[in-house]
Amino acid sequence: MARIAVIGAGMGAMAAAARLAVAGHRVTVYERLETHGGSVGRFERDGFAFDTGPGLLHLPAVWRDLFVKTGKEPLEKCVELTQVDPASRHVFADGTDVSLPNASRAGTLAALEAALGPGSGERWGEFLGRARDAWERSRRPLLEEPLPADTAFLSKDPYPALRQGLLRRPARTLAEIGTRELRDPRLAALLDSHAVAYGLDPRSAPPSAAVLPYMEQTFGSWYVKGGLRALADAVYERCLARKVEFVFGAAVTGVLEKDGRAAGLELDRGGPVEADMVVSGAPVPSLFENRVVTWAGPGERPDGRLRTGTGRLTVHLALRGARPAGTVHRTVVHAPDPAAEWDAVSSGRTGPRPTVVVMRPDDPLLRPDDDHETITLTATVPAEPAGGQTWARIAEEAADRMVAAAEAAVPGLRERILWRVVRTPEDTRHDTASAAVPAPALAGSSGAFLPAMNTCPLEGLYLAGGWAHPGGGLAHSGMSGALVAGLIVEGADFRGSR
C-alpha cells in the first residue's frame, strides 16, 4: 500500500483518488479551497441555483465506468440522468432557426434539410461520415491510452478531408471544412460552434476537431438533476466511501523531491507531507507559475504544448415568470461576424457581439418556484484582457451585449430579469488556479493541440485533470483520472483501458 498525495479536489483528481483507494492505496487530497469539484461549482441566491461550470454531460460512460469500478452502486443510483431532447437549438445570424434532436443522425439530417434547404442534411451527413473516420482513427490514442513520449504519429491529422479543386489538398483547419465541404455559412457556423464551446478558434483548430460534433451527436447530451454540481458531489461522496481523506484550505506550495523522485508536498500550513507518489490535479501551467514544481534541465517541462488563451464569461440570470412549455434546454445564438468575434478574442478584447450559449434547464431544484426561471449565458472570451483592461472594468458591458444577443432566443428577456451575476475568467482562476479553460486533446497541427503527458520527468509525479492528457472537458477529465490510476497501479506496462 502506497501513500499517495493528491493536489486539488477537481473532477480528474477525485476520479484518480477513488480508483487508487479501491486499489488499496492510502490517498489524501489537499485542496486550497474549502470545497471540492474545481470548475464544477454552484452559485445559489434567493432560492435560485446555477452551475458555474459545464451545464451538460457528454460521454456519461466515463463516469458510469468510475462508479462501477469503485463500488456496487452505479452512477444512476447516485444521480438522476436524463437525455436532453432537443439536444440544441441554433439561431443563425440570418434569423434561421433549427432544433436538433439528441443522438439521432437521421433526425438531425431531416431537421437541417427542412430548416436550411435541400442538400443541407446530405452535406452534414457526409461530413459526419468523415468525422466518424477521424474518431475511429484517433479515439484510442487520444482518449484511452497514456500519451507516449514519441507523439509523431499524432502530428498527422486523422480527418479524411474531401479533396476538391485544382490544388487537390485537404482542408487545413476546421473553418476550411465548413467553407469547402459544407458550403453554407449556417452549416459552417453549426460546425464551428462545437470548437467555440471549448474555446478553440475554428480558423486555427485542426480538422480533427470534427470529432467534437461527432461525439455529441453520436453519444448524446445528458443533464444531471440538480445541475452538474450534483455529479461532483456524488464523486466526492464516492471518494469518502472509499476512505479517501480530504484536507481543505491547504494550498500546496511545493512538491518534495528525494533521490530523484516525488516524495511528498509542501503546504502553506501544516506541512510538509510525506508521500510515496504525488498526483497533481492542478492546472499544469500553475505548477510552474507558482513555483510548485521546477525541473533541472531545459525542455523538460511537460506543459510545452499547452494552449492557454481563452476563458469563459458567464451571466447567471434570475427571471420572473415561468419557463414556457417546450423551451429548449440549450440554444446557441451565433455571432453575425465570426471572424470579427475571433479577431477580438485573439487580441484580448471581448468583441462587439459574441456567440452566446443560452442554458435553460427545466429543473425545479434550481428555482424557488414554478413562477420563476434560471438562465445561464456563456461566451468565449480572452483569459486575460489586453491593453491594461481588467475584468472588473469591462465585464458588465460585455454582459449587456450577451443579454442583448440572447433575446434572439428568449424574447423579452431583459424585462424579466430580477437580478444577474456575472462571472469572469478571474472567478475561474479563483476556482481552478487558471483563468483559461483547457480544450480536449486533438491530433494534427504537428502536435500543437496535445496536452501534457500524465507522467512527468520527476519520477513518482503524475498529472490528472483537464490540463493533462486527454485534455479539457468533463468526460476527458474523468478519463485522465482513469489513466493516472492505471499507470500507478499497473506501472509502465499499462497500455490503457480494454
Image (spheres, grey):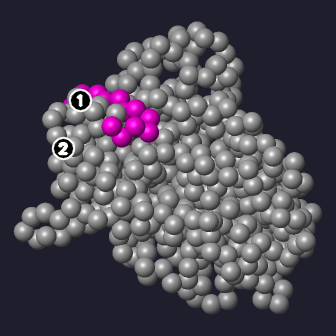
Residue 63 magenta: no
Residue found 66% across the figure and 84% down from its top = 457
Residue shown at the point (51%, 66%) measured from the top left:
140
The picture quadrant where one finds residue 153 is bottom left
The type of residue carrying mark 1 is Ala
Question: Does residue 431 appear anywhere in the picture?
Answer: no
Marks 1 and 2, how far apart at CA: 12 Å
Expressed as whole percent of the image width and height from the top left, the position of residue 456 reads 66, 79
- Please say if 421 is above or below 411: below
| Observer-nearest of 387 and 208 | 208
Within-10-Å neighbours for mark 1: few <14, some 14–19, many 20+: some
Image location of residue 318, percent across then percent down: 57, 21
**Of 130 and 186, which appears nearest the observer?**
130
Q: On screen, 407 above or below 335?
A: above
Lower position in the chain sequence, tag 1 or tag 2: 1
Residue furthest toward the left?
166
Region rendered in magenta = 91-106
* Residue occupied by mark 2: 184
Q: Which residue is mark 1?
A: 115
Which residue does the image show at 62% across and 70% down from the upper left?
Answer: 496
1 vs 2, front mark: 1
Q: Position of residue 473 (x, y in %)?
A: 55, 52
Q: Where is residue 410? Give x, y as percent.
A: 40, 21
- Residue located at (73% from left, 49% from top): 67
Between 116 and 292, the residue placed more toward the observer is 116
* Residue 97 appears anywhere in the view: yes
